[in-house]
Image (cartoon, rainbow, N blue to C red):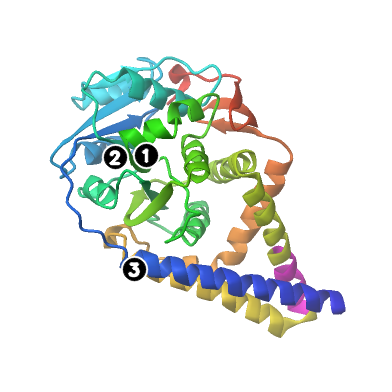
Amino acid sequence: MAGTLLLAAITILQGILILMEGLRAARHMRTFRPRRARRERISVFCPCKGTDAEFEKNIRSILEQDYPNYDVTFVVESEKDPAYTALRGFGVTNILVAGRATDCGQKVHNLGYAVTHTGAAPADILVFCDSDARFPHDWLSKLAAPLDATNITTGYRWYVVGRAHLPTLLRSGWNASTVGVLGDHNRNFAWGGSTAMYRETFERLNILQEWGGSVSDDYSITNAAHRSGTKIVFVPECLIPTYGESTWHELFEFTTRQIVITRVYHARLWRVSFIGLVIFNAAFFILPVAHPLLWLAIYALSVAQSWIRYRAVQTALAPEALSKYRWFYILCAPLVALLFLYNMIGSALGTDIVWRQIHYKLISPNETRVFGGSAASES
């Protein structure tokens, strides 16, 4: 009895702390709206591997930005990659072929190659993005607005759900939980799907060196920024929609891969999160019988956290990117926590991941072993 009461007390305290953090994050999401107009030249780098049903719409969203002075470089592993053929079919000509990565992630290799081999004159601002996201027409303008030589700006992904499809809903709910930790503080992380920095910041932080042997472009940027005291600014209006559905296999592979990467690149966060998830899941499945009222309090805290986060997201996302299944985001915390625990256990058992049909073993933040996969195998 005393043990379950202690478990309940710890879980409630944990829930209150997370709720307070969520309130601060929600305030940032609702109020952070810099309006500075920039005219410096921007170079956008978009690594591509394979295609999907939304590929053309995503690519055109990058090419049709309202920013007045920018260029886009797409980079692929091989001319055999379906993305290369598709890009050519869209009329894109600025495509670099980076070759196959042998000691780092293919995405990281592509980005490093593109930055060092682009034929365009050096731009003031570098932007990195993903080909599986749909960028609003003012994305570049919004991402660049708060940028200066002392910071990095970033957005984050929002998975759009079009129908009641459980693995797709769960992927979106799982991903949405991370939005609640981004705010006006020094613990933000860069998301590789939408990150901007001045070229001098890129060089000052030695990002090319940080990418050496790495599988994670964004964690490498994040770690370099944190070590140097460079602030990462989360721009809520750069919460970027990603369309498409997920199978159960894709859900488990994607979510576990993210946690494996976190274990290797941010071990302290991984350990703290693991402990917190064990506590929450234990309380959620033990207390309904032992202390139902305390269990209800814990669940109510999680519902409040999710409701506050979703209300804040509504102020940043376009209405068409919001789901009509709002109830799921508000009530799904126990399912999300269970999925996170599965991911944590999986990541504790090894650091092998599969990313775009390529197998990697993550040894350290700057050592990666590549075990196979090629552009020709993409479909």
Q: Main secondary structure of the magenta part?
A: helix
Name the residue type under label 1. Answer: Asp
Query: Up-down: is 31 above or below 74?
Result: below
Q: Position of residue 84 (x, y in %)?
A: 32, 21
| Residue 11 or residue 143, whichever sits in front | 143
Q: What residue lies at 63% left-to-right and 38% top-to-bottom?
A: 264
Viewer-proximal residue among 64 and 168: 64
**Secondary structure under the numbered disc 2 in the rendered image:** helix
Is 287 colored magenta in this rendering? yes
Q: Residues within 10 Å of mark 1 (few under 14, many from 20)?
A: many
Is there CB contact under 8 Å for labels 1 and 3?
no
Mark 3 or 2 closer to N-term?
Answer: 3
Instruction: Give the side of residue 3 with respect to residue 90, left or right.
Output: right
What segment carries the magenta color?
281-289
Residue at x 76%, y 82% (from the top left corner): 291
Residue 254: horizontal and vertical position, in percent? 54, 42
Residue pushed farthest left? 68
Q: Amino acid at mark 2?
A: Asn
Residue denoted by label 1? 132
Q: CA distance from mark 3 to mark 2?
A: 26 Å
Q: Mark 2 = which residue?
A: 58
- The quadrant the C terminus occupies is top left
- Tell whether label 1 touches label 2 (CB within 8 Å): yes
Q: Quadrant of the N terminus?
A: bottom right
